[in-house]
Amino acid sequence: DTGVSQNPRHKITKRGQNVTFRCDPISEHNRLYWYRQTLGQGPEFLTYFQNEAQLEKSRLLSDRFSAERPKGSFSTLEIQRTEQGDSAMYLCASSPGTENYGYTFGSGTRLTVV
Amino acid sequence: GQQLNQSPQSMFIQEGEDVSMNCTSSSIFNTWLWYKQDPGEGPVLLIALYKAGELTSNGRLTAQFGITRKDSFLNISASIPSDVGIYFCAEYTGRRALTFGSGTRLQVQP
């Protein structure tokens, strides 16, 4: 296992379309996180899973956003009815379930809404 | 919400120079994390600090957890071109969420 894997790396979509991103965490990590990063800013927390349970959601996660981790392994993040303001880098990270170590991030999915 | 103030926003230095950047918060925290982000990639953890006053090194990098628990600094000694990137401090807020600063962009002239 070489780290956190995210697909696709880049996505260009038309406004109003739905998009889905996938994250495969490090296999022994039971915590998984989604972050969003816009240009010139640090990553902003969206949501967190422990195994398959979604335990925390940011107010940034509007009702157009939904995240799942059905079997406690990979996760998907779906954005419905995309808007230009959704254009950002979407980062996934994972961590072990024992202590508050810093996360391991994936390389991200860069979304451009045109 | 929580805010982490990083300074400077950007730095342009010559190869071989030492670099210092810091991060401050209005709140007290129990952990300080320092990450580096290369263009088009996710952040990579450099150093984690867990105790006030703690001084930790990772190669040419040294970071300290401020004694007031409201600040931290990161030093890079003898900079090299591959040190180029954006350096973020981060703190745990919420149950597991990290809050990141806005970053210090470092450029190194060979």
Image (cartoon, coloured by chain):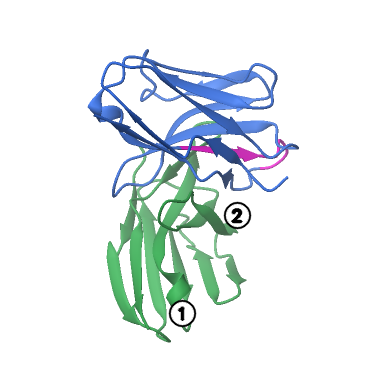
State the image coordinates of residue A83 (x, y, percent, origin top left): 26, 22
Q: The green chain is which one?
A: B
Report whether residue A65 is seen. Answer: yes
Write the residue at 75% across / 37% down. A28
Q: Earlier in the sequence, mark 2 or mark 1?
A: 2
Write the residue at 44% across / 58% down. B38
State the image coordinates of residue B65 (x, y, percent, origin top left): 51, 62
Q: Nearer the viewer, residue A94 or A58?
A: A94
Residue A90 vs B58, above or below: the answer is above
Residue at which label 1 appears: B80
Task: Tell me if mark 1 has few (under 14), some (14-19) or many (20+) residues whose alpha carbon lies within 10 angstroms of its own.
Answer: some
Residue at which label 2 appears: B50
Which chain does tag 1 point to? B
Element marked by disc 2: loop
Residue B3: image quadrant is top left
| Chain A display color | blue
- Based on the picture, tell me whether residue A18 belongs to the magenta stretch: no
Q: In which quarter of the image is the C terminus of chain B?
A: bottom left
Q: Which of A77 and B53 is in front in this view?
A: A77
* Three-letter code, disc 1: Ile
Residue B36 vs A73, above or below: the answer is below
Q: Please report the bounds of the magenta region as a residue range.
A: A91-99
Write the residue at 62% across / 38% down. A94
Which chain does tag 2 point to? B
Write the residue at 49% across / 56% down. B35
* Three-letter code, disc 2: Tyr
Element marked by disc 1: loop
Q: Quadrant of the N terminus of chain B?
A: top left
Residue A63: image quadrant is top left
Residue B15 vs A111, above or below: the answer is below
Q: Which of marks 2 and 1 is in front?
A: 1
